[in-house]
Image: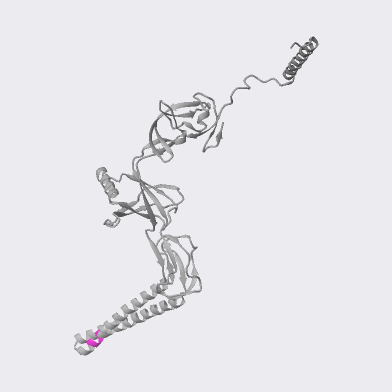
């Protein structure tokens, strides 16, 4: 069926009008739209997270659970009876040996001391008189003017007077001691706890405890090791002639104290039920971080350190050639580095070769990076953004 000529002309006319309008639209869009700069369509630099290579001592170690003990601890107890008139320390403070901690009322003991001094003076005066009479009786007896009975009586009185002097001196010494005991002093240097008796309370010379002092520096950590571990350490010391170990103490909060034994001794027999041997190690505790009664982990390593480079395992990638990481250099360019790996320690990987201590490796965003590509990064741990 053929269309009339009029209809053909109408279709052609409408088609041309549509084409014209489309062309006008594209022309106006090009004129009105801002010009796109060169390179605007290029792919932006990828954003990654990087982390510094870690240097760690990976020498073999043995870990033991230990308990902190005071080398010396003392319960302070009164040695005389009386009311407390003064407490001379601050609870929880460091007290030194011979510091006065408590003062017991001294009036009675001062009076007893004066009485003992007077008794001694009286006995000394009596001895002088009796000694002169004894010497006189000896002289008379030698001249046959005094009987043997009179001489023996004088000698007996002289000996009795000497005994009275000794007794008076002993009573005086006792009175001095009791007077000194009215000042309750610290027998050791250490930290004192709560005052269990306050001013005004009467204390007696019994087992009553006034306070407790615990020595803090040095301090002891006790732990148990198996018989096999003990033999291994023993053989190592015999072979090396000296102590070839160093220690780390891990506190309850996870912090580490690098310390070494001041001295060490072990028990004289192995526990047959547990096959373990008790070991007692003395440590310096200048900062008082080791608190008696707390539990710590004791790590014993060889004296010589073994340093190694470690990276997070999430930084590792692998292909048909082997293991590699991307390290970001100072210019912000990612560089592929092939690695020779060692052991795994927790979530970290020991790197034997392929990296330097100053390298920073990508730990997030690996899939967006190619070798030699410029990247934007944040350095984890240092909050450095570039």
**Front residue (pair 123, 255):** 255
In this rendering, position of residue 38 left or right of residue 212: right
Query: Magenta stretch?
Result: 151-155
**Residue depicted at 22% across the width and 84% down the height:** 138
**Residue depicted at 54% across the width and 25% down the height:** 374
**Residue depicted at 22% across the width and 87% down the height:** 152
Q: Quadrant of the N terminus?
A: top right
Estimate the x, y position of residue 296 in percent, counting from the top left.
41, 52
**Front residue (pair 20, 290):** 20
Verify whether residue 190 appears in magenta: no
Does 239 sit above or below residue 161? above
Does 176 sit above or below residue 15? below
**Front residue (pair 13, 363):** 13
In this rendering, position of residue 129 left or right of residue 314: left
Estimate the x, y position of residue 295 in percent, counting from the top left.
41, 54
Place residue 34 in its image quadrant.
Answer: top right
The total of numbered circles placed on residues is 0
């Amino acid at each position: 069926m053929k269309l009339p000529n009029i209809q053909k002309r109408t279709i052609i006319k409408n088609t041309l009008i549509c084409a014209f309008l489309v062309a006008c639209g594209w022309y106006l869009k090009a004129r009105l739209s801002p010009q796109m700069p060169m390179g605007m369509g290029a792919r932006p630099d990828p954003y990654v997270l990087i982390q510094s290579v870690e240097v760690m001592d990976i020498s073999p170690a043995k870990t033991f659970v230990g308990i902190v003990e005071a080398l010396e601890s003392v319960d302070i107890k009164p040695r005389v009876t009386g009311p407390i008139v003064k407490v001379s320390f601050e609870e929880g403070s460091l007290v030194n040996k011979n510091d006065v901690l408590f003062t017991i009322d001294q009036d009675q003991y001062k009076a007893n001391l004066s009485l003992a001094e007077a008794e001694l003076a009286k006995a000394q005066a009596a001895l002088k008189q009796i000694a002169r009479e004894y010497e006189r009786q000896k002289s008379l007896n030698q001249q046959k003017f005094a009987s043997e009975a009179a001489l023996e009586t004088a000698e007996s009185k002289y000996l009795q007077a000497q005994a009275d002097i000794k007794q008076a001196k002993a009573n005086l010494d006792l009175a001095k001691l009791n007077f000194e005991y009215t000042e309750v002093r610290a027998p050791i240097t250490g930290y004192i706890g709560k005052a269990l008796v306050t001013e005004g309370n009467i204390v007696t010379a019994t087992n009553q405890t006034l306070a407790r002092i615990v020595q803090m520096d040095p301090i002891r950590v006790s732990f148990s090791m198996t018989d096999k571990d003990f033999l291994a350490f023993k053989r190592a010391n015999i072979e090396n002639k000296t102590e070839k170990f160093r220690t780390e103490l891990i506190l309850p909060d996870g912090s580490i104290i690098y310390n070494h034994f001041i001295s060490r001794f072990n028990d004289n027999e192995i526990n047959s039920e547990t096959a373990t041997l008790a070991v007692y190690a003395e440590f310096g505790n200048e900062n008082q971080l080791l608190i008696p009664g707390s539990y710590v982990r004791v790590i014993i390593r060889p004296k010589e350190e073994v340093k190694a480079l470690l990276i997070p395992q999430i930084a590792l990638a692998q292909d048909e050639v082997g293991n590699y990481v991307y390290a970001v250099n100072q210019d912000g360019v990612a560089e592929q580095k092939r690695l020779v790996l060692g052991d795994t320690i927790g979530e970290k990987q020991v790197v034997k070769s392929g990296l330097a201590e100053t390298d920073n490796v990508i730990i997030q965003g690996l899939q967006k990076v190619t070798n030699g590509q410029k990247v934007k990064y944040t350095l984890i741990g240092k909050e450095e953004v570039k």
